[in-house]
Image: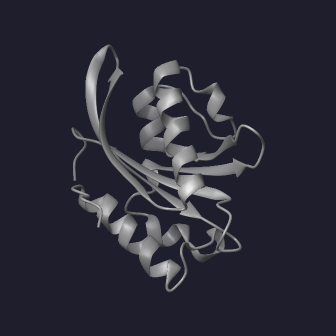
Amino acid sequence: MLDITHPKLQRLYDYWCEKRGDRKMPARADLDPLDMTFVIGNIILVDVIATEPLGFRIRLHGTNLAERVHYELTGKMLDDLPQVEFRNLTRQSFTKVVTTGEPLHARRDRILDERPRRYETIILPLSGDDSRVDMLICGLIYDDEKH
């Protein structure tokens, strides 16, 4: 059981659970963006590139998140993320989810606009064959955002 506090992230997790059914994880094809309008601006959709080390391409960087951090990652590699410390933490988190096939939930701090910002995130695995994680869907919401 994940200790998710933000209602939008809990709703995203519940949706993921519903779509996976009896499987370990749903496929990307199981998800409908229209079902996720409540959180779509706070979503990051990531392609997992099965190289050594793993590669991660940002398919979608939600508009709320891009505006918040003042850069756009849609279509770019995780390695293009400008903040080295945050990039390394994100790589570790993504790799853990790909390796375990299990969701990851965290509450963390990062520096934005030279100020500490607290956020909650959930990283959910997706798989076209229910064994190899080929995509990730991440929800990320900063504490000072409205519910």
Q: Is residue 48 left or right of residue 138?
A: right
Quarter residue 23 falls in: bottom right
Q: Nearer the viewer, residue 56 or 34?
A: 56
Q: Is residue 115 left or right of residue 138?
A: left
> How far across and down, in percent of the image, does residue 95 sit?
57, 45
Residue 61 appears anywhere in the view: no
Q: Nearer the viewer, residue 115 or 93?
A: 93
> How far across and down, in percent of the image, does residue 7 sit?
24, 61
Position of residue 136 relative to residue 127, above or below, is above
Residue at x 68%, y 42% (from the top left corner): 57
- The residue most toward the right is 51
Which color mode does the image show?
one colour
Residue at x 56%, y 72% (from the top left corner): 31
Q: Is residue 49 left or right of residue 125?
A: right
User: Which image quarter holds the N terminus?
Assistant: bottom left
Quarter residue 79 falls in: top right
Residue at x 37%, y 62% (from the top left corner): 38
